[in-house]
Amino acid sequence: MLRVAVIGLGDVSKVHIQAIQDAQNVELVAVCDIDQTLKDSVPSVKFYSNYLELLEKETVDCVHNCLPHFLHYPVTKACIDKGIHVFQEKPLGLNTAEGLALVKLEEANKKVKLCVCLQNRYNESFEKLQEMVAAVNFGKLIGLKGLVAWFRPKSYYVSKPWRGIMEFAGGGVMINQALHTLDLMQLIGGEIEAIKGSICNLLDYGFEVEDTATASIIFKNGATGLFFASNANSENASVEIEAVFEKGKLVIKDNKLMMTNDGITKEIIEDMRMPGTKFYYGPSHTKLIHHFYSCIKNNTGNYVGAKDAFTSIAMIDAIRKSSEENRVIKMEV
């Protein structure tokens, strides 16, 4: 029986807890949050308000780190130092410095597994897209496009102030809403040569973090990428990822993979849905969580580790630096 704890009982923790409860031979033994009003939010499970106390008093095999961004590194490190596996919500860290620290921590603790929740890699639409790209039936990859047009009201930041502060959030729309899109783009495009980006605030909210970002990405294979993300839309529109090849085009939109070839467009596959959750979480939290449990039990390593999750954080830092310095940034990942 795998003994599991959840630290941080914010919005996304509900998805994690449901996945834990749905898993076979897994027991949720404890939860933790500084908000005492959440004490009875998970019935029949021991509640802690201090994660260090939980780690000291409970015997757990895996911790789900569902805390705000600035607590990802310290809490994950505390778990790994105790030999406890970690399933950590995205992002990997606040920036490349924290990301590298977690990569080094991972490398120094080979027996302890750290999985970062980049669950959209496991969406059926994206898995099929990767399979079709690998088959090279469409010829050379020419370009990629990633679009995230969402809406976040001012109350989104006011209700949880850390979201609007660089020191605690590590950024705005890029790290909070569009990280998955950047991650999927680099998986399709491969190694990145350089990035030229621009960030700004279209909304008059008065917070430090950006609400809009755009970038031109040059991949080492010669393909180009266009990335655009904003929280200034009127709604949470479907994320769109487009891959253009010499002989066709693949597009993920509305949780469906579409193929255009010889002027004919057809649907290839549609993602499974997760009832009761926000559509933009993607359908694959449970899939990745259960896969990670299997990796723990079988001591295998084919999950999303810190090193795998690092590139998307490096892309965000490069876009920010490019915007601040108004120049092309060479990628060193």
Image (tube, rainbow, N blue to C red):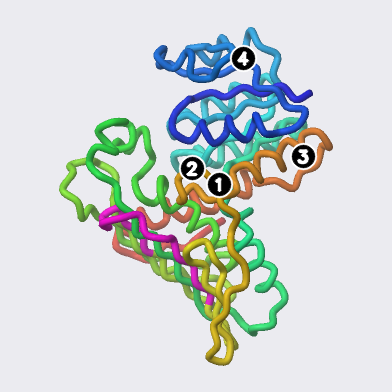
Task: Point out the frontmost of discs 3 and 1.
Answer: 1
* CA distance for labels 3 and 1: 23 Å
- Do labels 3 and 1 touch, CB within 8 Å? no
Q: Is residue 234 magenta?
A: yes
- Give the left or right position of residue 115, taking residue 172 as reference: right
Q: Is residue 2 left or right of residue 133?
A: right
Q: Nearer the viewer, residue 81 or 33?
A: 33
Residue that sits furthest to the right in the current view: 298
Against 16, is 75 above or below?
above
Viewer-proximal residue, 326 or 181? 181
Residue at x 30%, y 51% (from the top left corner) = 151
- Residue that carries the numbered disc 4 in the rendered image: 55
Residue topped by disc 2: 277
- Circle 1 Cα neighbour tier, 10 Å, few/some/many (<14 / 14–19 / ≥20): some
Q: Which residue is mark 1?
A: 274
Asked if disc 2 and disc 1 are in contact, CB closer than 8 Å, the reply is yes
Task: Give the magenta range.
Answer: 228-243
Give the residue type that dot 4 points to: Leu
Q: Is residue 122 magenta?
A: no
Tag 4 secondary structure: helix
Residue 295 has which mark?
3
Q: Secondary structure at mark 1?
A: loop
Q: Residues within 10 Å of mark 3 (few under 14, many from 20)?
A: some
Badge 3 amino acid: Cys
Indicate which disc, 2 or 4, sits on the residue closer to the N terminus.
4
